[in-house]
Amino acid sequence: MLESLIVGFDRALRTLAGNVAATRPAPGADLPEADLTPEARRHAAALMRVNHTGEVCAQALYAAQALVARDDAIKASFAAAARDEEEHLAWTQARLAALGDRVSLANPLWYAGSFAIGIVAGLAGDRASLGFVAETERQVEEHLTTHMDRLPEADRKSRAVVDQMRDDEIRHGAMAVEAGAVPLPYPVKRLMRAAADVMRAVAYRV
C-alpha cells in the first residue's frame, strides 16, 4: 500500500506539472500545421483543453481505483490503461502548446475530485469499479465523437489525436466489460454525465 501511495503521489505531481511523455508518436505528427483564423484557433485550443482536462481526470481515476482494487489482475489492467491515458495527456498538452494556449487552471481541482470519485468507485468492489470504467469510457467515446464534429476541418493534427484517443477509450471500455464489469444504476450514469458536463463547460473557458 505504501509503495502504491508513493507511485500515486508521483503520478499526481507529474500530471499536474505537465511532466509527461508519450512512447507512441503523436497521431498526425507528420501532418502540416493548419493555417487557422484566430477564432478557429481559439476554438480548437479550447476543445483540446477540455480533452487535456479529461485526461487529467483519467489519471486520477485510474490511480485511485488501482489503489483500492482487490484483484492484482485488475490493478494491472488499470495501470495499463493509465499508461495510455498518460500518452493522451502528453498529446493534448503538445497540441495546446502548438495552438498557443494553456491547460485548464482548475486542473488541481479536477484531479482531486476525480481521485475521490475513483476511491468511492473502487471501494464499491472490483466489478462495480470496472463498471465505472466501462461507463466512463462509453461517455468519453461519445464526447470525443462530438469533438470530431466540432474541431475545425482544417485542423487535421488535432483531429488525428482525438481520433486515436477515441479508439483507445473504446478499447479500455471493452477490456473492463471483458474483465467482469457490472452495469451501473441509471441515476449514477446521469450523475457522471452531469459532472462531466460541468467539467467540460469550465475547462473550455478556464
Image: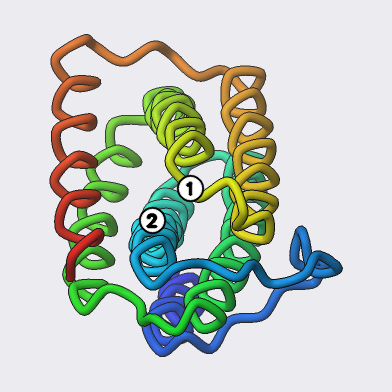
Q: CA distance from mark 2 to mark 1?
A: 7 Å
Secondary element type, mark 2: helix
Q: Assess whether mark 1 and mark 2 are in contact (beta carbons under 8 angstroms).
A: yes
Residue at the right extreme?
30
Secondary element type, mark 1: loop
Tell me residue 108's x, y (percent). 23, 76
Q: Which of the 4 image quadrants contains residue 179?
A: top right
On screen, residue 35 versus residue 80, left or right, reads: left
What's the residue type where badge 2 is placed?
Answer: Leu
Q: Nearer the viewer, mark 2 or mark 1?
A: 1
Tell me residue 143's x, y (percent). 41, 34
Q: Which of the 4 image quadrants contains residue 55?
A: bottom left
Q: Is residue 40 above or below residue 182?
A: below
On screen, residue 91 versus residue 3, left or right, reads: right
Q: Is residue 116 above or below residue 103?
A: above
Quadrant of the snapshot with the C terminus = bottom left
On screen, residue 24 versus residue 167, left or right, reads: right
Total numbered badges shown on the rendered structure = 2
According to the image, label 2 marks what residue?
A: 47
Residue 29 seen from this side: yes
Q: How is the image coloured?
A: rainbow
- Mark 2 or mark 1, earlier in chain: 2
According to the image, label 1 marks what residue?
A: 151
Q: Is residue 24 above or below residue 123?
A: below
Tell me residue 29's x, y (percent). 79, 69
Crowding near pointer 1: few (<14 within 10 Å), some, many (20+)?
A: many
Residue 133 seen from this side: no
Crowding near pointer 2: few (<14 within 10 Å), some, many (20+)?
A: many
